[in-house]
Image (cartoon, rainbow, N blue to C red):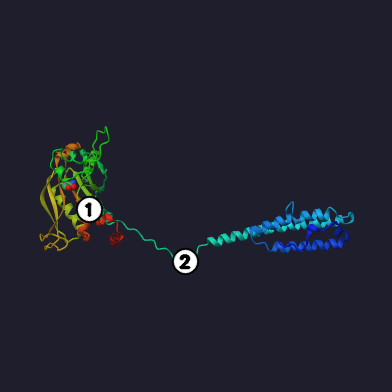
Amino acid sequence: MPVPLDYTRRTLDDIRAGSPEHVETLFTDLRADFDAAAAAVDTAGAWKSLRDAWLGRKSGILSAITDNWLKPAPPELKRAVGAALNQIKAHVEAVIEERRLAVEASADQLALAAERTDLSLPGVARPIGTRHILRQTMDDFERIFLSLGYSVAQGPEIETPYYNFEALNIPETHPARDTMDTFYLDLPPGALTQYLLRTHTSPVQVRTMEKQQPPVRIIVPGKVYRRDNPDSTHSYMFHQVEGLAVDTDITFCEFKGTIEYFIREFFGPKVKTRFRPSYFPFTEPSAEVDASCIFCDGAGCRICKYSGWIELFGSGMVDPAVYGFVNYDAKKLCGFAFGLGVDRFAMLKYGIDDIQLFFQNDVRFLRQFS
Ligand code: DAH
């Protein structure tokens, strides 16, 4: 910082040679120098230099003046020098404090300005997610069956052979076990229970009836697993919705009516339903439900192999043997059950020809169903 007057070399003689007026001039010049220096301070660094230059204990200007002007001053000038020194000291201290506040305030301003959001900048477009088409399809099933008084039940994906097979009237030697290639979990050493990935949602029928007395009306949406070779219609993991209704007065008629209503609600009012005799260990009689082909309205096309009908899912009246496993009174109770493939339903409804598309998470595919 330029200091025009060389305060530190002022000698006793300079002061002695002076008069009270000379002292006044010296201090007026000094003050003007300080004011000019203080006015130029605009950063924290410059402020520190100013403070050290003027108030520094060892080499500060005011200390030098005390040593060189006040201490050697002759008695007749001492009062005047002392009073002027006190005045300038008070002035310097006050101004330095004032500058400190000003510099801090402008630093805050700068920081705020740097942080300010520029509202004129273009925004970043964030893609909006959608419910997966399989989730949407399951939501449709839930909506339809909730309107019929059903509730939604769930069960574990890791199951025991008891719930997945035995309690559904599929004993160990039953050939039906072979048709469902099952993933078994490694048995930890010493473990007594074998676990598997459920091959269908039917075990939740048993789990629900164990916990709940009739009437029971549930649907069970969920994931199931099979050791199938992946191709356009097979996947290791796919989705089913199980349905179960048990009460004292359920007839085959209610069963058919419920299924027909559900199919029309899902595929549209034109679609017809037919029941073909079939076999499942846990239903008697069992039926395969077909729908009139939704692509050709039953006229015959490549998709329905020119039969006019498309096979949809398995169903039937609950086999009394199943009631035995859950301590239901088979003589008093009656019910029906069904189990359908969600993926297959979605493929038919939306004309999707490859089940793998559901699981590849290509947004170009998923976006079509937003
Ligand atoms: N669980 C059978 C399967 O995955 C489907 C099924 C058929 C479920 C008939 C049922 C039923 O509840 O009654 O192949």
Q: Residues within 10 Å of mark 2 (few under 14, many from 20)?
A: few
Residue at 74 percent across and 58 percent down: it is: 92
Instruction: Measure the C-alpha gap from mark 2 to mark 1.
Output: 46 Å
Residue 203: image location, x then y, percent? 22, 42
Q: Earlier along the polypeptide chain: callout 2 or callout 1?
A: 2
Q: How many marks?
A: 2
Residue 259: image location, x then y, percent? 17, 52
| Quarter location, residue 157 | top left
Q: Which is nearer the eye, 305 or 256?
A: 305
Q: Residue furthest right?
A: 76
Q: Residue furthest front?
A: 9
Residue at 39 percent across and 61 percent down: it is: 126
Q: Amino acid at mark 1?
A: Val
Q: Return the mark for residue 121.
A: 2
Residue 196: image location, x then y, percent? 23, 41
Quadrant (top left/top right/bottom left/bottom right) for the N terminus: bottom right
Q: Which residue has dot 1 on it?
A: 342
Lateral position of residue 195 relative to residue 272, left or right: right
Q: Which is nearer the eye, 234 or 297?
A: 234
Q: Amino acid at mark 2?
A: Leu
Q: Is residue 251 visible?
A: yes
Q: Is residue 318 visible?
A: no
Residue 370: image location, x then y, percent? 30, 61
